[in-house]
Image (tube, rainbow, N blue to C red):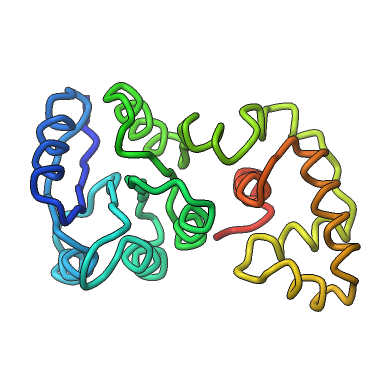
Amino acid sequence: MNKIDVIIVDDHMLFSQALNSLVSKFDEFNVIKVLNDGAEVVDYFKNNNPAPDVILMDIQMPIMNGIEATSWLKNNKPAMKVIALSMECEEETILAMLRAGAKGYLLKDIHPSVLKHAICEVHKNGFYYTENVTSTLLNANTISSTKNTIVLKERELEFLKLACSELTYKQIAEKMFLSPKTVENYREALFEKLEAKTRIGLVLYAIKQKIVIL
């Protein structure tokens, strides 16, 4: 069986060493490098070192943080699969990592079995989000298989694509030449139709249905 090659990026030495030890214990994985920050990630790839299958990326790091490093990978190594591993579950932070190109978002207090499953899922299917993240920020049933049959109207699609950008709802209203109240109605209608509770739910739906490519 070919092992899944993993790179760990985290500036906290004790955590990165513990994570290295944990991941290495699983027969499915092979940790090929532990890096301290995003700048080291850039240097690693610029020096033509062996590319991993999955990168576990911390967010808050000196020199170059996880969002910046993931964005660099998206632009320079688009096939690279990044899983964010963080203590933060703030909506804006998760959205920033998704926009930067992260394929998964895990909280650092997850069970080892969840970490193992997430790495395998991202490697095989291209994305994974833990229940901790989704249940906190989305409806637990968001984006179920039945959502493939949902038909969105043209203006709903337009709003959904803009919701995946960095624009505020007010700016979206201006771009769509609508009142903020009308845009709010679009948002609430999509929340109900897609069974989402937050903007992240809309973004995840758009990503998984390939309505947008972040």
Q: Toward the viewer: 169 or 42?
A: 169
In the visual, does 126 lie left or right of 14?
right
In the visual, does 111 lie left or right of 42?
right
In the visual, does 191 lie left or right of 110?
right
Quadrant containing the N terminus is top left
Residue 136 in percent (x, y) is at 54, 36
Quadrant for residue 64, please give it: bottom left
Q: Toward the viewer: 188 or 149?
A: 188
The residue shown at (28%, 46%) is 56
The residue shown at (65%, 27%) is 141
Residue 31 in percent (x, y) is at 14, 40
Residue 47 in percent (x, y) is at 13, 69
The answer to whether 164 is drawn above or below residue 57 in the figure is below
Quadrant for residue 48, please give it: bottom left
Q: Toward the viewer: 195 or 128?
A: 195
Quadrant containing the C terminus is bottom right
Residue 35 in percent (x, y) is at 14, 56
The answer to whether 30 is drawn above or below residue 181 in the figure is above
The residue shown at (20%, 65%) is 45
In the visual, does 196 lie left or right of 213?
right
The residue shown at (58%, 58%) is 213
